Image (spheres, grey):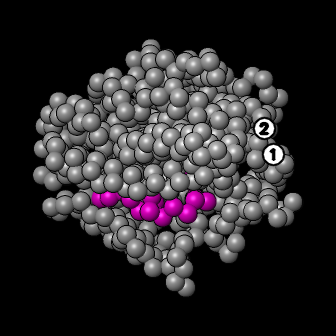
Amino acid sequence: MNMPIKPLDPLDGAVGASHLFRDWLRGELVAGFLAPEHGDAGRELEAAIAGSGGSSGMEIGPSPLFDSPWVAGWAEAHAGDFPDDRDRDRFRGQVAALQRGETDVVVTGQQPGYLGGPLYTLFKVATVIALARHRSDAGQPTVPVFWSGDDDDDLAEALDPVVWLPGENEILKSPSTPVIPGGRSRFPVLGRMETGPWKSGAASIVERIASLKQGESGLLARDLKEIWDLALTENWDWARLSRRTLLRVFSGSGLIVVSGDDPGLHAAAGPLYGKILANREKLADLVEQRGRQLTAHRWHAQISGRSLAKPLFMVEQDYRVPFEGGDPEPDPARLRPGVMLRSPLQDWLLKPAAVVVGPGELAYLRQLDPLYEELDISRPPLVPRLFAWLLPDDFDSALLGKFRNHPAAESNLANILAAEAEEKVRLVLEEILEGRLGLEQERARSLSAGRARRWSKGVESMLRGEIKQSRLDSLPSGPAWVFPEGARQERRLAYLCAAALWGDDLVAACLDAASSHLEEGQKNNWREFSIQVPDPGK
């Protein structure tokens, strides 16, 4: 079944609340502290397609990860997760070429989540595959890589995606309070989780969709059901389940998956961890200063002081605990990066020719520019991911404009507004403590930052509630799965729900849309896209 794709309105209008991303798309991300080549998405795309891995300034050869002992064990396990011999044979050839340094990688990533995570995961992966194909066609052999953020432990975010089933009158959610054996109040790293009602609940969703699909259109749903059944029978951890489903969804694409919780991967990063451990305070200060510069230019500082205070973690019995620095030479296989260090670790290990990103990641990476420079890590070009809507053929696309133009259109608006309020309160408190009460500058700064941070949490919670209600009150009419719970579809609808409902034809359409997205980007004509899908409710 052909699923037509169509460019919609300019992308900069669709992401208007993400000022930094919008300005980047327009080539207007300009400030004295930013490198000129980082201010224009079109220029970065051009560099991504034409350049070599790790940029032209780095030595030729395999990346540190593919030049390490990690490869053998990973490749053997990874090969077993491909759906057929064709994919396995191709993968083995890719690994050999990567070990010889004869091919580049382009990378994107996402934390695994309920039924695979949000729909934009599908768009990220489609974009990185399309980018690898464009580069290969231009004479630069390239492998698409998905970096699974399964070393995270943010279960609330992981369980946030929702699903919809034909015949249901409402959006279905994952269980919100899973039971962890032992009654612990914290959760293990996501990739290691093996039990929980969200997993069996997801399996039942896949089974119900598979029972509704017939013939060729239901092949992907039936394959996903078999994978889920096997995962439950053999008690797979979440990392393997996520990897196995992703490789089936994008079968034949050449995609490979790297786990962020792989101990061997972190052992290979030992030299980088050594630099970080010797320089942690300075690195955090550099990132904090850049965050202030971004905020002063009305852009967003993605990394909070709380995250900067916890740059590294140790894995202890499947749990992450902040690394306090007591051991001067910790085992790197047990180290895990916090928010500040995830991308630098990825880029040091893989030497990617480009990284596919969304709005939040762009803000995060621009804040990390001085850290990359301090650690002497080459900054790869960044490429915007595909933005798309799955729409029934009779849907009035003008409703998308009404949805987008709502004042609360951006999903992370509460975070953005709370961060702006926090910065203003911090400055006011700092002035009171230092200027009027006579405290020393360092103490005034520390006290004001801590109090403003705690205050902003309540403000953000209040804003989230008001934004959600405002969106629901103004929601355009249409199927529930188009605007799930008043949110942007790609951020709430689970991608494996969509993949099972619309099958391999949807995946092919996403790849076509991603290719068109890059072609339009080369003309500085960034657009949103629509993918016309049958309404499964009819």
Please name the residue shown 33% across and 22% down the image: 10
Residue assigned mark 1: 279
Classify 10 Å Cα crowding around label 2: few (below 14), some (14-19), many (20 and above).
some
Residue assigned mark 2: 375
Instruction: Point out the tag, 2 or 1, that comes first from the N-terminus.
Output: 1
Classify 10 Å Cα crowding around label 1: few (below 14), some (14-19), many (20 and above).
few
Which residue reaches farthest bottom? 182
Q: Nearer the viewer, mark 2 or mark 1?
A: 1
Horizontal placement of 362 versus 469: left or right?
Answer: right
Please name the residue shown 49% across and 71% down the image: 231
Horizontal placement of 437 versus 396: left or right?
Answer: right
Please name whichever residue, 32 or 140, is drawn nearer the observer in this view of the structure.
Answer: 32
The answer to whether the residues at label 2 and label 1 have Cβ atoms under 8 Å apart is: yes
Residue range (magenta):
143-163
The amino acid type found where label 1 is placed reads Asn
Q: Position of residue 5 (x, y in %)?
A: 30, 31
* Residue 373 vertical position relative to residue 224 in the rendered view, above or below: above
